[in-house]
Amino acid sequence: MSRPAVLFVCLGNICRSPLAEAAFRQEAGRRGLDVEIDSAGTGDWHVGGPPDRRAQAVARRNGVDIGHYRARQVRPEDFRRFSHIVALDRDNLAALKALRPADGTAELLLLLDVVEGRRGEAVTDPYFGDEAGFDATWADAVAGARGLADRIEGQL
Ligand code: 4NP
């Protein structure tokens, strides 16, 4: 594989996928893994906006500043530019499959499929919940980041 490139995808790109992006940046940095990393949403409501304040707060508590991230929507080119497109839940995985152009080369994955014992599980959307939900999202993002880094290192 040439330089791997990973895109994390949720619905709004303001809660779950920015946290997955942040956790994976941390994990790749720790391992010295040379990888391009980004996140996007299947929906367009928050395009151009920063991550949810509660997502910014949980990332900051865990050592990453995501205040400069800006939401964007998934584009057809993403399926050629990224080697891996990682959905945070099944609905977004299904949306990605529907959006994938015929010449798309990216491998589509569900984040928790790469975590032992969590196969098929979704990262729960914390948007309509309380602050504690964001800690759970961060924990899932960290577990997913480790599993994904293992997988990509195994594919190099
Ligand atoms: P995310 O969370 O998909 O994890 O970024 C959501 C953010 C916003 C909305 C839904 C989910 N919304 O309906 O605006």
Image: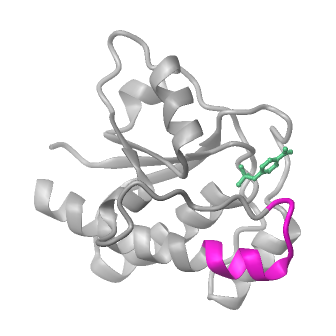
* In the foreground, 111 or 120: 120
Q: Main secondary structure of the magenta part?
A: helix
Write the residue at 58% across / 24% down: 75
The reply to whether the magenta stretch includes residue 132 is: yes
Query: In the picture provided, is 98 more to the left or to the right than 10?
Result: left
Query: In the picture provided, is 151 more to the left or to the right than 47?
Result: left
In which quadrant of the rendered image does the C terminus lie?
bottom left
The reply to whether the magenta stretch includes residue 4 is: no
Write the residue at 64% across / 78% down: 136
Any part of residue 156 in sight = no
- In which image quadrant can residue 64 be found? bottom right
* In the foreground, 91 or 65: 91
State how many labels appear.
0
Any part of residue 132 in sight = yes
Compared with 137, 99 (above or below) is above
Q: Where is residue 5 in the image (x, y as percent from the top left)?
A: 36, 47
Query: In the picture provided, is 56 more to the left or to the right than 36?
Result: right
Compared with 135, 141 (above or below) is above
Q: Where is residue 90 in the image (x, y as percent from the top left)?
A: 52, 43
- In which image quadrant can residue 91 be found? top right
- In which image quadrant can residue 2 be found? top left
Query: In the picture provided, is 22 more to the left or to the right than 56?
Result: left
In which quadrant of the rendered image does the N terminus lie?
top left
Write the residue at 73% across / 75% down: 134
Q: Where is residue 77 in the image (x, y as percent from the top left)?
A: 48, 22
Compared with 99, 144 (above or below) is below
Write the residue at 48% across / 76% down: 142
Stretch in magenta:
127-137
Residue at the outermost top position:
102
Coloring applied to the structure: one colour
